[in-house]
Image (cartoon, grey):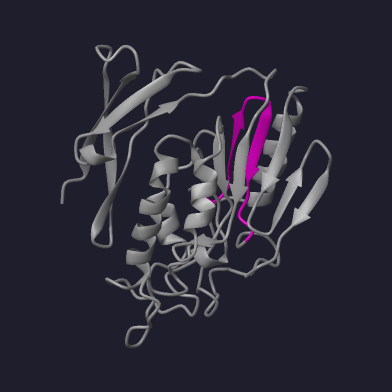
Amino acid sequence: MDLESKVEYWPEFSPWHRHSVDGIGSSYYKSVHFKARLTGLQESTKYCYVIDSAPQAAGCFKTQSKSRNRKTKFLSYADVGVNRSMPTLKSMGKEKDIDFIVHGGDIGYGDDIGFDKKKSPGSSLKPGKSGYEYVYDQFMDLIEPLSRRVPYMVGVGNHDVSSSILNDGFFDNFTAYRTRWKMPSDESDGVENMWYSYNVGPVHISVIDTESDYDGAPTNPHTIIAGGRGGGFRRSQIDWLKQDLQTASTDGKLSFIVTGSDANIDGSTHKMDRGSRS
């Protein structure tokens, strides 16, 4: 299976100034997921791109302004799957001038029910045409009109731990989530999409893992049910969050937001919006 793919990209009004970068693929179940880092991008500039292995996925996006003296507009939601999600996604698609989207966890709900709403023998949640991977692929197709033009930032929820809410033995420890997505963990000294941070204009976003790797977390390396084992990553999430917020607080023009599946904290008002697990 080919583990390389090339991305070409260029400023919208300068198609002759083309850049090329090789994507790195990760073999996963019966497919390969590619990640490529585009370098040399200028702020507030619209770029177009094409992927040689998937030309149908070509699109355009606009880079962000680094200015701290501007408004930032983003959409935040969570707990969204394939079934009955189109009204929400269509409404989001109508929003103009969005800087980014935050999907705070429970992505696709492939662990909960098959796309055909029927349980296959043994478990409808096993990989297969009507199982976990099929549902996840369908969800990725649904959000593509948004994610190909606007940064789509994700976090984990309890439905992202494994391929089954009952732990049927596939893809535990957030395997699908960690393989399918690429968040700026390396750039923010975070861990594998689980916790990381980034700045957009005057806003600093810290994404945390509310499911594992803290005292009393619902998921740990010894969990048997409720999605099975998870967590036990190589460094302390709490220590990382303390350092991340301390660094962000040194910039007087930054407001910070901590977001996770169970709670969102606005650092400018110190208010917590605590959600519920489902």
Left or right of 64: which side holds 35? left
Give x and y (percent) for residue 214. Answer: 67, 60
Give x and y (percent) for residue 203. Answer: 67, 31
Give x and y (percent) for residue 261. Answer: 63, 57
- Look at the image and tell me whether residue 257 can be seen: yes
- Relative to 122, say whether 207 is above or below: above
Give x and y (percent) for residue 246. Answer: 74, 34
Residue positioned 72% across, 27% down in the render: 254
Residue positioned 51% across, 33% down in the render: 187
Nearest the viewer among 216 and 85 is 85
Left or right of 104: which side holds 257? right
Residue positioned 55% across, 36% down in the render: 100
- Relative to 192, say whether 127 is above or below: below
- Relative to 168, say whether 49 is above or below: above
Nearest the viewer among 269 and 45 is 45
Left or right of 167: which side holds 28? left
Q: Can you tell which quarter of the image residue 219 is in?
A: bottom right
Read off the magenta span: 193-210
Q: Can you tell which quarter of the image residue 98 is in?
A: top right
Does the magenta segment cover residue 226? no
